[in-house]
Image (cartoon, rainbow, N blue to C red):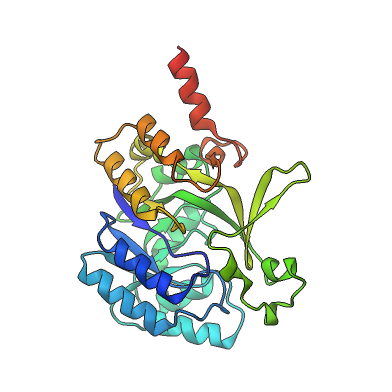
Amino acid sequence: MKLSLGPILYYWERDTVFNFYNEIADTPVDIVYLGEAVCSRRHIIRTDDWFELAKKLADAGKEVVLSTLALIESESDLKRLRRIVENGKFSLEANDMGAVRLASAAKIPFVAGPHINTYNPQTLALMNELGAKRWVMPVEMSREALSHIQANRPAGMETEVFAYGRLPLAFSARCFTARHYNLPKDDCQFRCLDYANGLTLKTREGQPFLALNGIQTQSASIYNLIGELDSMRQVGVDVVRVSPQAFHTAKILRLFHESLENRLSAHAATQKMAALMPDQACDGYWFGRPGIEQSYLRQSAGEDAA
């Protein structure tokens, strides 16, 4: 299996982004997704900057994929999307059907991103007909459901699984971070810059529940499937994805790499990962359970007791 790094989902300062990818160039990651996938108001990194970063990472031996917005809202968003489609060098991750249409019309192979609702073999077959070379499983999908789709996967289609990071659950035209500060979306003062890993939302009982990331809602818990790499192999997964974090991303990638090369056991990798996570772990969706649950540790504890 290959290791990928998804697009940065948060709003970071320009120097932070460039320094981040300078570090990533020296990691054992195979595929790097670049670009703004969340909010069109995030302009610190321009399209030309993403192209520059793409060239540097490609020169470092990485496969580079340019990610597109999950929610297209204006003509300027479409203009940016067309530039990505027409870049002439790098493939793209289509995160909405508009990007799928443009890539298909241009006969450019693309990755069907996690925000495309690919929940059955028929939809996956359609993506294949339109030119998708790889698809990213929706984060709510279970291993069992994935296994069914894999049994009917079109020839040549690769499968990628979101395996680490806060789960991107939903998008809205409303900006929740701005609303938290009683600001309108068009005058949000770019408050997302204050939250490098999102703004945690707690229940009345004080339990971390969700994370607000501008127009995106994420899980507060960190989805962590480093202990499930063997089960991914069994169902034919080709790529495992790590979502960029404000801290320790390079270390996390190296842990995944060691696990993929069977130099680190699932249990040891899970224990080492705990020290690098900004919040508690979850993996419930993979086991067909509520997403907030952590099934792997409970299952491991039962095996150890036996």
Say left or right for 230 vs 243. Answer: left
Give the mark count: 0
Q: Which residue is at the far top?
A: 306
Say left or right for 101 vs 190. Answer: left
Say left or right for 212 vs 179. Answer: left
Q: Quadrant of residue 214?
A: bottom right
**x 56%, y 38%: residue:** 284
Please identify the quadrant where the C terminus is shown: top left
- In the image, residue 260 lies at what x, y percent? 29, 42
Whether residue 219 is visible = yes
- In the image, residue 251 lies at what x, y percent? 34, 49
Q: Is residue 230 above or below residue 193?
A: above
Whether residue 154 is visible = no
**x 67%, y 47%: residue:** 209
**x 44%, y 41%: residue:** 275
- In the image, residue 263 lies at what x, y percent? 24, 36
Q: Is residue 157 above or below residue 264?
A: below
Please tell me which residue lies in front, 110 or 67: 67
- In the image, residue 242 lies at what x, y percent? 41, 53
**x 53%, y 52%: residue:** 166
Q: Quadrant of residue 264?
A: top left
